[in-house]
Image (spheres, grey):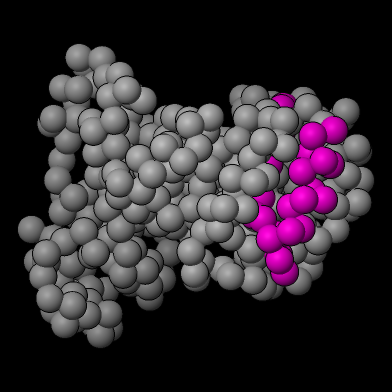
Amino acid sequence: MLILAPMQGLTELLFRRAFYRCFPGAFDYAISPFISLTHGNLRDAEKKLTDVLPQNNRDAMLLIPQILGYENAEFVDLANRLFDLGYREVNWNLGCPMRRVAHKHRGSGMLPYPDEIRSVLEYVLPRIKPSLSVKIRLGYYCADEIDAVVPVLNDFPLDNVTIHPRIGKQMYSGRPDLQKFQRVLPSVHHRVIYNGDVFSVADYKKIRSLFPSVNHVMIGRGALYNPMLPIQIRQQCPEDFPLSDKLQESFQNVPSIPYFIQSLMEDILQMDISHQAKGRKMKEYWCLLSRALPGTEARKRHVLHADRLEDIHRLILEMAK
């Protein structure tokens, strides 16, 4: 399986809907950007849950919501609310590396404290209706922290464990520690999903070759640098992804990357936010998606130097032809 990774502010509904419209069947499902337990009232959560509400995701890829935080009662309330909305699995974020998150013992900042992880799981799992999966890193301060976390996870009936083989302090710098991932893999009693630096078909093949027991791969930035990547992987790895005639035909007729960029930008224009916010969002996506387009870096930077929304939009459309 190929899974779209959660990236806060990027793989939100807007992106997932446009991606599914242009490249249906490319990903098997997505993990949503995290829903924090600390912001807003969960009992009046329509705004908080906008990104995952089923009525908003009818024309988007299949989704598993992700929860960030350790507040037990709120965790149970949110997970059960999501179950009532139709979700049969939720994911617990133990991997977010952002300092403002990690310094509060959330995301990867909780990995140095396996007893706290155990305490949450002991409280939450008997009380929630959906199944639970977790997304982790090797640790926050050092990769050996995972050695104390895995035995805790093994004691609970989790659906799966996604491992990004970096530590939180690294953010996204350096290379994934594949040797540590290989050493820890046999000790995990749950299905393992690999996540980290899959930017090409060669990267995917390398992971599958090194870890043949891992047949679920999560792709994050790779899908923003090259939106065609999951389709390329499926087409070039038929032993992993036997394609039906219908899906093969669909992949042969998918729109181009420039069309996807144009479509995404048109969706941004329809958002109920200020012109300034629309411009910032267009630039944010452009910084990533423009890597898939030919052209000089100097020319691409013209977008980032533009101030007016109309100019930002016009320049992107001109370069994404």
**In front here: 237 or 76?**
237
**In front here: 42 or 274?**
42
Q: Position of residue 23 (x, y in %)?
A: 27, 36
Q: Please, is residue 25 above or below residue 271 in the view?
A: above
Residue 187 relative to residue 96: left or right: right
Q: What range of the chain is rendered magenta? A: 130-155
Where is residue 288, by image quadrant? bottom left
Residue 238 relative to residue 35: left or right: left
Indicate the quadrant containing the N terminus: top left, top right, bottom left or bottom right. top left
Where is residue 269, by image quadrant? bottom left
For residue 66, say whether it is visible: no
**In front here: 90 or 38?**
90
Q: Position of residue 69 (x, y in %)?
A: 76, 54
Residue at image x 37%, y 73%? Answer: 280
Q: Residue most toward the top?
A: 245
Residue 17 shown in magenta: no
Q: Position of residue 212 (x, y in %)?
A: 48, 31
Q: Please, is residue 211 above or below residue 301 in the view?
A: above
Where is residue 130, by image quadrant? top right
Residue at image x 15%, y 22%? Answer: 249
For residue 233, say whether it is visible: yes
Residue 139 shown in magenta: yes
Q: Please, is residue 97 above or below residue 66 in the view?
A: below
Q: How many marks?
A: 0
**In front here: 187 or 309?**
187
Q: Position of residue 310 (x, y in %)?
A: 21, 73
Residue 188 relative to residue 316: left or right: right
Residue at image x 50%, y 37%? Answer: 211
Residue 102 relative to residue 285: left or right: right
Indicate the quadrant containing the C terminus: top left, top right, bottom left or bottom right. bottom left
